[in-house]
Image (spheres, coloured by chain):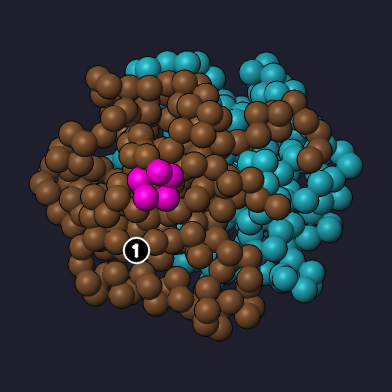
Chain colours: A cyan, B brown
Amino acid sequence: MQTETHVDVALIHFPVVNRNDERIGSAVTNLDLHDIARASKTYGVNSYWVVTPDAQQQELAAQIVGHWTHGYGSKVNADRGAALSLIKICSSLNDVLAGSAEHYGNPPLLVATSAVCRENTITYNTLRKKIDNDCGVVLLFGTAWGLAPEICQQVDYFLPPVGGKGTYNHLSVRSAASIVLDRLLGDREDNEKTST
Amino acid sequence: MQTETHVDVALIHFPVVNRNDERIGSAVTNLDLHDIARASKTYGVNSYWVVTPDAQQQELAAQIVGHWTHGYGSKVNADRGAALSLIKICSSLNDVLAGSAEHYGNPPLLVATSAVCRENTITYNTLRKKIDNDCGVVLLFGTAWGLAPEICQQVDYFLPPVGGKGTYNHLSVRSAASIVLDRLLGDREDNEKTST
């Protein structure tokens, strides 16, 4: 049985920035849906919000999700459907916050990850403790070159960039989301265990 | 500057098994190359071996890598080229072991991850200590439904499955590789730090 948390994940396609720091909307990527849904399901995330205001992009995302949750895909790989059923498609961060507040009964803490350092940061260990105490949390991830400034202004806290001891820091959003979920929700005893 | 480790990653496309436990070769997936190369570069991995005996699949992988390391891609996104330049394409696990032994001067420890529990397991913490002591390690990942038995028989140790406290355990190989690298090579101080 999956242990459910009070944690949501949201992947923002608009507004984000491109390599020139210009405000853009990005396209939905099939493997962002699959990989982040699979990681979310593995770590007990409650909802995975896919955020795009573009109607055609919403339709594309819904078709992919429907294939695995109700269509042919659901017959050949039920595990995939279990993961993709966490996906909720919506238009804006405000939709995420409203939906999450309704589900948890209180406005969630809005926490973003960032490949660069920010002022209002929170440590992984501190956030992990809040999650353990059933604090409602929405973990925000940006596509393209990252979240636009107006999204960053709404964020309560930023997590420091993940990585090794070097300076290269260009993980895919799929990898970053997986690592952040493991750091916040992974079974810490795993590191000492030889079997599960 | 990137801190280099004595750790290689290898992604096996043959021999692996399908959902019916039959021995197959899987196709090279573009985002497996990108995501695992980016995570490898981030965590200081020395080489990322892409293993397939199929000549056309090797050519496809080489074209993708070449685009980012020497072609047009290298001009628009040098960071991506830096990651994909870690990729070495080869035909078999024996090629990986020979290349790694030559580079490190000794046969490497062959460690696989597995979504199921195995007998000869090693804890993340124990392997992390070996890596800190400059032990040469090849981390093996399987595509499709996992490594074929003849590959498993060559493995020195298995790492326990990663995940949360629930029972769902169907991460993508891209997510699993990212999480394993973070557990073995991630900056542990990150969890207490508010900035880097």
- Secondary structure mostly seen in magenta is helix
Observer-nearest of A11 and B84: B84
Q: Is residue B62 magenta?
A: no
Observer-nearest of A67 and A41: A41
Host chain of mark 1? B
In the picture shown, does residue A164 fall above or below B125?
below
Alpha-carbon neighbours of circle 1 within 10 Å: few (<14), some, or many (≥20)? many
- The type of residue carrying mark 1 is Ile
Q: Is residue B29 left or right of residue A62?
A: left
Examine the rendering and report whether any part of residue B88 can be seen. yes
**Residue at screen point 63% across, 72% down:** B77
In the picture shown, does residue A124 fall above or below B141?
above
Question: Which segment is the magenta one?
Answer: B101-105
Examine the rendering and report whether any part of residue A53 can be seen. no
Q: Is residue A42 left or right of residue A16?
A: left
**Residue at screen point 83% across, 58% down:** A149
**Residue at screen point 42% across, 50% down:** B103
Mark 1 sits on what residue? Answer: B89
Q: Position of residue A20 (x, y in %)?
A: 77, 73
Q: Residue furthest right?
A: A119
In the picture shown, does residue B162 fall above or below B104?
above
